[in-house]
Amino acid sequence: MSNKKRYFVTVFGILILCLFILATITAVSSVFFTVEFNLLPGESDSKKLTVVNPLDSPAYNISHTPVAGDGAEMVSIEPERIDEIEVDGEDNFTISVSIPKGQKRGNYTTYSYFFFPSEGFPPSMPERVNILITVAPKIVEVYGIDLGIDGEEDVMTKDVTINETASFELTVKNTGIGLDVMQIGEPEFEDGEGWDVKLYTLKEEVSEFPCVMILNAGEVDNLLLNVTGTMPGTNLSVEITGRSGANATKADSVRAITFITKKVEGAVNDSDTTEIGP
């Protein structure tokens, strides 16, 4: 073979090799799947990436590369390898993200290449999975109020007998960042015939509304709601709403529900055999 032909074959071979490498890089660089996280500093979350075996035989050694990118230190993927997935079976990788408390806000892009099962030769190229992380600024509530009732967030229900008082302990918390004047509205209910509803501070019955409570940031104070009924088989739902004096749009409410039951005549107390009757 002449030098000219040998040179042509060499150049042509190199060109084919370059095209093959370029095609390989392009295939590897394409994004197969994207997982997104939106978290605040100090928060963490995890999501599952499910791998299904579409082959007619078991799939072995499904693995992934170490996480890379500008947020790699915040990401972990478990397990490192799935040893086997049966025909038509599936298994999961867990992608976990943990944001340090002092992490700067912004968008972070990380990725890992996964080696999925395939048939034939050569084996399929690894697939890129992007893990996009948005670290949002922590929102600080300037003004806010939170009401609770007997340790619950919203509703408490109690059963009492005729003329027996159901007592509900209310908590009022300033969730803002500074001093605020909380305003507690008058108890609201419908058809209160036969019912007595009273609200107390720690010192006395509240007679003027709104009831004013001055609280520092994070401070909690208490109220007592007493409900008494006279008609058996009835119930009363009482709602109490509190608002921030500095920002009336910041409000919260709780509901106390009281049921009046009948006394059971002729009942026997097993402890002392004392009969309860008319």
Image (cartoon, rainbow, N blue to C red):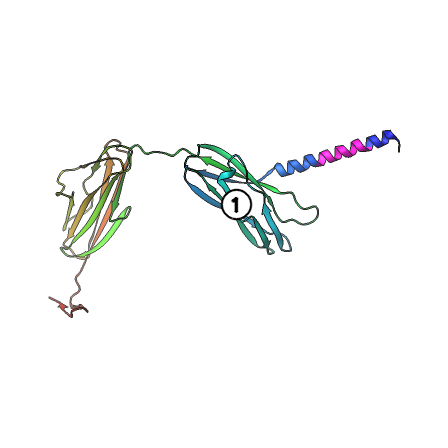
State the residue in front, 195 or 174: 174
Residue furthest out toward the left: 278
Placement of the N terminus among the 4 image quadrants: top right
Q: Position of residue 182 (x, y in %)?
A: 22, 36
Placement of the C terminus among the 4 image quadrants: bottom left
The local secondary structure at tag 1 comes to: strand
Q: Is residue 51 magenta?
A: no
- Count the labels in the image: 1
Q: Position of residue 216 (x, y in %)?
A: 24, 35
The range drawn in magenta is: 9-20
Q: Main secondary structure of the magenta part?
A: helix
State the residue in front, 187 or 206: 206
Asked if residue 107 is positioned above or below residue 190 in the image, the reply reads above
State the residue in front, 188 or 182: 182
* Residue 25 placement: quadrant: top right
* Residue 41 placement: quadrant: top left
Asked if residue 113 is positioned above or below residue 140 in the image, the reply reads below
| Left or right of 140 on screen, residue 208 | left
Q: Residue flagged by tag 1: what amino acid is it?
A: Ile
Q: Position of residue 181 (x, y in %)?
A: 21, 34
Q: Position of residue 131 (x, y in %)?
A: 52, 39
Residue furthest out toward the bottom: 273
Q: Which residue is mark 1?
A: 77
Taking the spot 84% from the left edge, 32% from the top edge, the residue there is 6
